[in-house]
């Protein structure tokens, strides 16, 4: 970003708790960033239900409402030991557990005529490197899985494809999974403050890398 460029608007999403947990750090971090702001970007945040049926439409509505330049979606990946920017979203819903509406799709395409996969529009290697260099474990993840987070990433990237043309300003979209906090049985290093610090670094990296 050049010094004279206006601050980009970042839509930051996270999720409500799911799978019996009483909180979800992805929603907590998104909410915090929306409240506290960030020096490099105008942040708006939304916490979405863990619902195959509802989350994509709510995300699309939030994009329409806020007209962001960048969409950074967060989700919890409780079995990971790092902050993991996602490289690929698959055209597949295959839920290990029911979502918060009780839906459990298996072996189902998200868009019957859509491409098999969509690739992130975020600089995932630079993001992982910058977070890791600040002392918070981070690594690029190949796949966002086959649950609601993957569905949200796939659909958001589809919205971005339609925006990059004459009809709208380009939209830079990607997804970052965060690990479980100590309250959820995760590594003691992954406090909410540390996850927030990591995501703040991700925002700075994305804004700095913008063409
Ligand atoms: N993680 C789930 C869905 C909501 C969340 O925070 C996932 O990884 O798909």
Image (tube, rainbow, N blue to C red):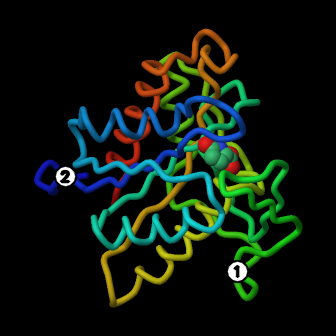
For mark 1, does the 10 Å Cα neighbourhood hold few (<14), some (14 to 19), or many (20 or more) residues?
some
> What quarter of the picture does the C terminus occupy?
bottom left
| Residue positioned 56% across, 36% down in the render | 128
| Cβ of mark 1 under 8 A from ligand 1 | no
| Residue positioned 79% across, 75% down in the render | 109
Residue at the spot of label 2: 7
Residue at the spot of label 1: 111
Horizontal side of 125 relative to 14 (left or right) equals: right
Q: Alpha-carbon distance for marks 2 and 1?
A: 34 Å
Count the labels in the image: 2
Q: Identify the residue at the far left of this view.
A: 4
| Residue positioned 35% across, 48% down in the render | 45
Q: Position of residue 140 (x, y in %)?
A: 66, 41
Q: Helix, strand, or loop for circle 2? A: loop
| Residue positioned 63% across, 67% down in the render | 154
Q: Position of residue 167 (x, y in %)?
A: 33, 89
Q: Earlier in the sequence, mark 2 or mark 1?
A: 2
Horizontal side of 42 relative to 98 (left or right) equals: left
Compared with 5, 32 (above or below) is above
Q: For this rendering, which residue is in front, 14 or 170?
A: 14
Mark 2 vs 1: CB contact within 8 A: no
Q: Position of residue 179 (x, y in %)?
A: 64, 29
Q: Helix, strand, or loop for circle 1? A: loop
Compared with 114, 78 (above or below) is above
Q: Identify the residue at the far right of this view.
A: 107
């Amino acid at each position: 970003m050049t010094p004279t460029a206006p601050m980009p608007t970042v839509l930051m999403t996270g999720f409500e708790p799911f799978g019996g947990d009483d909180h979800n750090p992805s929603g907590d971090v998104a909410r915090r960033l929306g409240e506290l702001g960030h020096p490099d970007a105008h942040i708006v945040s939304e916490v979405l239900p863990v619902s195959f049926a509802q989350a994509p439409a709510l995300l699309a509505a939030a994009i329409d409402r806020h007209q962001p330049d960048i969409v950074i979606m967060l989700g919890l990946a409780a079995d990971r030991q790092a902050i993991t920017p996602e490289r690929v979203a698959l055209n597949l819903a295959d839920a290990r557990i029911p979502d918060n509406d009780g839906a459990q799709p298996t072996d189902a395409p998200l868009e019957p005529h859509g491409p098999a996969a969509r690739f992130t529009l975020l600089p995932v290697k630079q993001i992982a490197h910058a977070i890791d260099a600040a002392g918070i474990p981070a690594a690029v993840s190949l796949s966002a899985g086959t649950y609601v987070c993957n569905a949200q990433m796939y659909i958001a990237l589809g919205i971005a494809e339609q925006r990059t043309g004459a009809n709208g300003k380009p939209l830079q979209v990607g997804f970052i999974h965060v690990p479980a906090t100590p309250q959820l049985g995760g590594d003691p290093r992954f406090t909410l403050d540390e996850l927030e610090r990591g995501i703040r670094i991700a925002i700075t990296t994305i804004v700095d890398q913008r063409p």
